Image (spheres, rainbow, N blue to C red):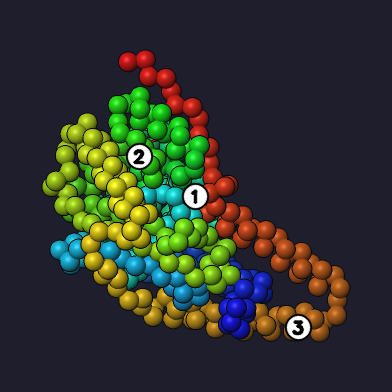
Amino acid sequence: MGVWQLIKSQFICLLLICYVFLVSGLIINLLQLCTLPLWPISKQLYRRINCRLGYSIASQMVALLEWWSGTECNLYSHPESYKYFGKESAIVVLNHNIEIDFLCGWTFCERFGVLGSSKVLAKKELAYVPLIGWMWYHLEIVFCKRKWEEDRRTVAQSLQNLRDYPENFWFLLHCEGTRFTEKKHQISMQVAESKGLPKLKHHLLPRTKGFNITVQNLRGPVTAVYDSTLNFRNNETPTLLGLLSGKKYHGDMYVRRIPMESIPEDEGECGAWLHKLYQEKDQFQEEYSQTGRFPGAVLTPARRPWTLLNWLFWASVLLYPLAGLLVRLVSSGSSATILTTAALCVAVSVGMRWMIGQTEIKKGSSYGNKDAPVNNN
Ligand SMILES: CCCCC/C=C\C/C=C\CCCCCCCC(=O)SCCNC(=O)CCNC(=O)[C@H](O)C(C)(C)COP(=O)(O)OP(=O)(O)OC[C@H]1O[C@@H](n2cnc3c(N)ncnc32)[C@H](O)[C@@H]1OP(=O)(O)O
Ligand SMILES: CCCCCCCCCCCCCCCCCC(=O)OC[C@@H](O)COP(=O)(O)O
């Protein structure tokens, strides 16, 4: 292990990165709150400002991936698809078995200039994650309870609101609805069997309702679906904690552009189309596991300096006062103050650990874990 790698793996570095993220995030969340009065005056200005503020939070996590850990994310695609990336709004369909898949998505959003405006159909629980959830509120992220009877109205309404969004955005959909585990896979393949659908080896059976409602409500302003398939080399299983300790991973993502016109409007046909898409994705994953390659050519855009510059800005603003505070604390000699500060640090660390836990598959929900309903038809 090199000296730089050794430094990066020290706990103090993790603490400092989390400190900058936390304090800058709170400041940005506060600024976002201050923009609320703009909404009735100029909705589009409110949205444009919040895209920039959101960028300042999300790009710190991208900087962690690209600059701190040095993780490589290769893009496999086709030139006729590539020329549209970043120049239109799109629905992104992505597999969901890797803890940092959202960050690999974010890194491409950043490189194509749509990070601040990126959207997702996210489970409602994520709305309560401090900083990220609060940021998402101002970015008009669409949340679902994964209970169709409740979601059908709220999700449709939130999607309708995005139709006049003033910036190009990528709308991420994990159609599997939950992250891959062996048990969830087994259960979803029972569902596939009961529906007479071919079994998938690398994916859960996609849920079609969310995709269908998204296509229905965004058709027009959104001109394409980006079918995206992600995997990591040498069976790497990347984690957020690994990134924080400076571990470098090697990801590959295959993205192909499918024009919106080729997606059926009829609900049943649209669902069948999605099932077929997942069968194709399964073949791409199979090819990757056998050859270490996806179809298409490697067309990875270079990382840009903005995420690093944004992080350096916040670090220089926030680390200097922290150092001053620590010096004054120690020189005060008051054990009560020192103990209170230590207790506060422990509480904040526990909070940050909880947030990181949100990305861990082993702490995931039980959605898709229950035995499939018996099909009596
Ligand atoms: C280049 C790439 C860059 C990309 C990056 C771009 C942007 C990045 C932006 C942000 C990054 C942030 C990352 C955050 C990630 C967080 C993501 C999540 O939170 S994923 C979880 C939430 N999202 C979803 O669930 C979306 C998919 N789900 C759906 O579409 C669902 O249909 C639903 C709308 C949520 C409704 O769910 P519900 O369970 O209520 O209904 P369903 O129709 O799904 O279920 C009933 C239906 O399913 C059949 N069934 C039963 N059991 C199973 C099973 N185990 N597997 C599959 N199917 C099952 C059942 O028989 C019913 O079938 P039918 O409809 O035929 O009757
Ligand atoms: C500079 C960076 C410093 C980093 C410090 C740590 C910050 C931690 C931030 C946590 C951010 C959480 C944001 C999004 C997490 C996405 C999680 C996810 O992928 O959700 C899973 C759901 O799809 C499905 O849930 P399950 O049913 O599988 O359960």
Q: Residue at x 82, y 68 (%)?
A: 339
Q: How many numbered discs sit on the rendered protein?
A: 3
Q: Position of residue 120 (x, y in %)?
A: 37, 52
Disc 2 marks a residue whose amino acid type is Leu
Report helix, strand or loop for mark 1: helix
Disc 1 marks a residue whose amino acid type is Leu
> Which circle, 1 or 2, is nearer the viewer?
2
Q: Is residue 249 above or below residue 318?
A: above
Q: Residue at x 46, y 58 (%)?
A: 235
> Which circle, 2 or 3, is nearer the viewer?
2
Q: Is residue 20 above or below residue 229?
A: below
Upstream in the sequence, badge 2 or badge 3?
Answer: 2
Q: Is residue 116 shown to the viewer in this render?
A: no
Q: Is mark 1 within 8 Å of ligand 1?
A: yes
Q: CA distance from mark 1 to mark 3?
A: 38 Å
Decide: marks 2, 3 in contact (CB < 8 A)? no
Q: CA distance from mark 2 to mark 3?
A: 60 Å
Q: Which residue is mark 3?
A: 328
> In terms of image quarters, where does ligand 1 lie?
top left
Depth check: 66 or 312 in front? 66
Q: Residues within 10 Å of mark 3 (few under 14, many from 20)?
A: few
Depth check: 169 or 34 in front? 169
Q: Which residue is mark 2?
A: 200
Report helix, strand or loop for mark 3: helix
Disc 3 marks a residue whose amino acid type is Arg
Q: Position of residue 205 (x, y in %)?
A: 36, 37
Depth check: 200 or 50 in front? 200
Q: Which residue is mark 1?
A: 126
